[in-house]
Image (cartoon, helix red, strand yellow):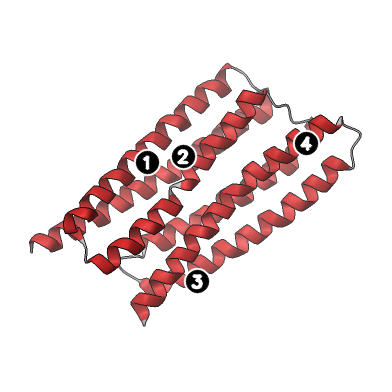
C-alpha cells in the first residue's frame, strides 16, 4: 500500500507538471501576440517574465518528480524510462523561454509582411505539443493510446518543417539586408525547435509503450 500511494503521488505530480508545461506554451502564444502587434515593448517584457516564472515552476515540479522516483516510488525499470522522458519533455518549456529571450536580447523586428507566416509557424509548433501531453497522461493508464499520440506529434513536426522551409525561402528571396535575413532565419529555427523537442519526447514515449505492451 505504501508504494501504491507513492506511485499515485508521482502520477499526480506528472499531471501537475504537464499542466505547467502547457501554461508555458500558452504564455508563449500570448507573448508572441503582443510582439506581433506591438513589437518589443514593456508589455512584451512583462510577458517574458511571466513565461520565465512558469518555466521555473515546471522545473521545480520535474525535480520533485525525480526526487520522489529516486525514493523508490516506482520499480527501477520504469524509473529510468520516465525520467528520460521528462528530461526530454522539459526542453519544451525551456525552448518557449528561449524564443522570447532571443527576440528580446536581439531586439528583433519581424516585417509586417511576414507576420502571418510566423503566426502559422508558431501555431504548428504549439499544436505539436498537445498530442504529446495527452499521450503522456496515458502513461499510467491507457498505454495503447501512446503510440497513436506520438505519431500525431511526428505529423505536426513534419508540418512545422514544411512551414520553416517555405518561410526561410521567402525571407532569403526578399530584398532585406543579409544580416536581417540571418536573424529572422535564426528566429524561424528557434520556433521550429519546439516541435523538434516534442518529437524527441514522443520517441521516448513510443519506447515506453513498446516495453509495456510487449
Residues under labels 3 and 2: Cα distance? 24 Å
Q: In the image shown, does 98 or 133 lie closer to the viewer? A: 98
Mark 1 vs mark 2: in front: 1
Q: Earlier in the sequence, mark 4 or mark 1?
A: 1
Q: Earlier in the sequence, mark 3 or mark 2?
A: 2
Q: Earlier in the sequence, mark 1 or mark 2?
A: 2
> Compared with residue 41, is residue 147 higher up or lower down, i.e. above or below?
below
- Quadrant assignment for the N terminus: bottom left
Residues under labels 1 and 2: Cα distance? 8 Å
Image location of residue 184, percent across then percent down? 74, 36
- Looking at the image, can residue 131 be seen? no
Q: Residue at x 51, y 21 (%)?
A: 46
Q: Residue at x 87, y 31 (%)?
A: 176
Q: In the image shown, does 14 or 23 lie closer to the viewer? A: 14
- Assign a secondary structure to mark 1: helix
Image location of residue 111, percent across then percent down? 79, 30
Say the numbered circle drawn on residue 24: 2
Residues under labels 4 and 3: Cα distance? 37 Å
| Residue 114 occupies quadrant | top right
Residues under labels 4 and 1: Cα distance? 32 Å
Q: Earlier in the sequence, mark 4 or mark 3?
A: 3
- Looking at the image, can residue 187 be seen? yes
Q: Residue at x 51, y 53 (%)?
A: 129
Residues under labels 1 and 3: Cα distance? 26 Å
Q: Is residue 56 left or right of residue 102?
A: left
Q: Are marks 1 and 2 in contact (CB under 8 Å)?
A: yes
Say the numbered circle drawn on residue 182: 4
Amino acid at each position: 500500500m505504501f508504494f501504491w500511494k507513492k506511485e499515485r503521488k508521482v502520477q499526480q505530480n506528472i499531471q501537475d507538471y504537464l499542466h505547467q508545461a502547457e501554461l508555458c506554451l500558452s504564455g508563449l502564444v500570448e507573448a508572441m501576440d503582443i510582439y506581433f502587434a506591438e513589437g518589443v515593448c514593456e508589455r512584451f517584457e512583462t510577458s517574458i517574465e511571466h513565461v520565465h516564472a512558469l518555466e521555473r515552476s515546471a522545473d521545480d515540479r520535474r525535480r520533485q518528480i525525480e526526487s520522489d522516483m529516486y525514493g523508490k516510488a516506482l520499480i527501477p525499470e520504469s524509473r529510468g524510462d520516465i525520467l528520460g522522458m521528462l528530461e526530454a519533455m522539459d526542453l519544451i518549456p525551456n525552448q518557449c523561454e528561449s524564443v522570447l529571450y532571443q527576440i528580446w536580447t536581439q531586439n528583433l523586428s519581424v516585417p509586417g509582411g511576414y507576420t502571418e507566416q510566423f503566426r502559422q509557424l508558431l501555431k504548428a509548433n504549439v499544436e505539436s505539443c498537445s498530442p504529446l501531453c495527452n499521450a503522456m497522461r496515458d502513461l499510467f493508464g491507457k498505454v495503447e493510446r501512446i503510440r497513436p499520440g506520438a505519431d500525431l506529434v511526428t505529423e505536426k513536426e513534419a508540418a512545422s518543417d514544411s512551414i520553416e522551409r517555405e518561410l526561410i525561402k521567402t525571407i532569403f528571396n526578399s530584398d532585406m539586408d543579409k544580416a536581417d535575413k540571418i536573424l529572422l532565419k535564426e528566429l524561424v529555427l528557434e520556433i521550429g525547435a519546439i516541435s523538434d523537442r516534442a518529437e524527441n519526447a514522443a520517441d521516448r514515449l513510443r519506447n515506453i509503450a513498446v516495453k509495456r505492451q510487449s
